[in-house]
Amino acid sequence: MAERKEATVPDIGDYDDVPVIELLVQVGDTVAKDQGLVTLESDKATMEVPAPFAGVVRELKVKLGDAVKQGVVVALIEPSGGAASAPTKPAPVAEAPKPAPDAPKAEAPAAPKPAAAPSPLPTAPAAAPRTPPVSFDADAVAPDKVPYASPAVRLFARELGVDLTQVSGSARGGRIVKEDVQAFVKAAMSGGARPAAAASAGGGLNLIPWPKVDFAKFGPVESQPLSRIKKLSGANLARNWAMIPHVTQFDAADITEMEAFRKQLGAENKEVKVTPLVFLIKAAVAALKAFPAFNASLDESGENLVLKRYFHIGIAVDTPDGLVVPVIRDCDRKGLLQLAAELGEISKKAREKKLGPADMSGGCFSISSLGGIGGSAFTPIINAPEVAILGVSKSEMRPVWNGSEFTPRLMLPLSLSYDHRVIDGAAAARFTAYYAQMLGDLRRLLL
Ligand code: CAO
């Protein structure tokens, strides 16, 4: 067998977990020296891992969504003897604009994405950034969902407000080329597909422009750029708020006994911190099992509900750079202590900016807990394509009428926002009542 040599991720600074967002070659492709093999996206730039020599790609060692760092082998290449062979595919970035490495990013308001992996910033990437970074969709890293297109085509699509996940690629291997994007826009203009920027009169939001105010006229001001996470999650939140008919159902759970048990557990298990959130996760699993429409997503047509038979719960985590929603998987198969340990790990990872795309994808239902901070209720925004999110506020002792007298009970405020296209008000009220019942008597979780 001919010799195969490794192509590895070059020096991208001291950073780990940079996601692979694009595979630029396939096994069997002939590549020239320095031709891009895969595209990585840090939160500062999109960059390619170049082939260190010309040859034939014999094996790809990474897949879409993998998080890589310097030295990771991306492909095995059979060298072609030194001379750069003609590539079977052109290096896609050749036509892309090349902003200065620190140039402000052109975020994609028309292609909103969820809070992305806060991938570390490479300060001196060996492969120079070729395009402004592509907004990164944690859910879209599922291999079957990542659009297969070059950075230049991504940039072109972004400029036109086209969501590439909606475009079919006509080139080899389903790769999307510029002509596909143009055809998509043409179809949209004639009433077919609908790119965000091409929303026709009456079909789009038709909003008046954002107010343009010279604030300095009124007093001293300072301009601060939004963090990358805020830009990405902001676009995502705006889309979800605008496109999903939200209703929020308020309720309260009596957690007096739960809290006593939690304190006991905490005293017995010093190695993990057991907060109310782990009980909320377990109760969410029970409620999702009892009300399967809450563990579902609308498909792209909006005409079918995809019911999920797994129980992955997203947890909103507040970080200095903004909100991220890592996902704890298979919560139905985990006990309270294991969930407490995992919650501690993901919160730490989130705050240290170490979450990878895989940590934030695949959620069924989210919980946003402001209980450690305060407040009595709020209206959380649904984390699409999920159909509901539970907001939890700070528990407080309240006098509760038990039929004959007021007794002091620790009450936990619940705020359930739901997608009214999928869930009716009565179902939401039943869901929160059931949820409160689970928390009120934990033995019911065993049923
Ligand atoms: N009522 C009263 N006290 C509560 C509570 C509640 N509902 N929930 C938590 N607490 C207490 C905890 O028991 C803990 O108390 P002690 O330190 O005395 O044990 C304290 O509040 C702090 O808890 P925590 O916040 O560290 O831990 P958590 O498991 O409750 O939450 C996490 C973890 C990551 C969800 C949280 O730190 C966080 O980031 N919350 C913000 C989420 C957010 O921003 N949501 C808004 C998004 S907009 O939709």
Image (tube, grey):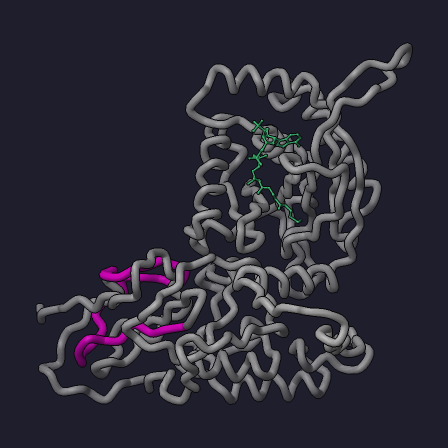
View extreme (front): residue: 220
User: Which one is nearer the viewer's eye here, 409 or 102?
Assistant: 102
Residue at the image point whose x is 78% and y is 73% from the top: 205
Residue at the image point whose x is 26% and y is 78% from the top: 29
What range is drawn magenta here? 46-72
Residue at the image point whose x is 27% and y is 81% from the top: 35
Which corner quadrant of the image does residue 229 belong to?
Answer: bottom right
Expressed as whole percent of the image width and height from the top left, the position of residue 394 reads: 70, 33
Look at the image and say whether residue 192 sits in the magenta stretch. no
| Residue 64 visible in the displayed image | yes
Residue at the image point whose x is 57% and y is 18% from the top: 263
Is the N terminus in the top left, top right, bottom left or bottom right quadrant?
bottom left
Count of numbered circles in the view = 0
Is 347 placed above or below 68 here? above
Is 166 placed above or below 324 here? below
Expressed as whole percent of the image width and height from the top left, the position of residue 342 reads: 46, 36
Ligand 1 quarter of the rendering? top right
| Residue 427 visible in the displayed image | no
Expressed as whole percent of the image width and height from the top left, the position of residue 274 reads: 53, 26
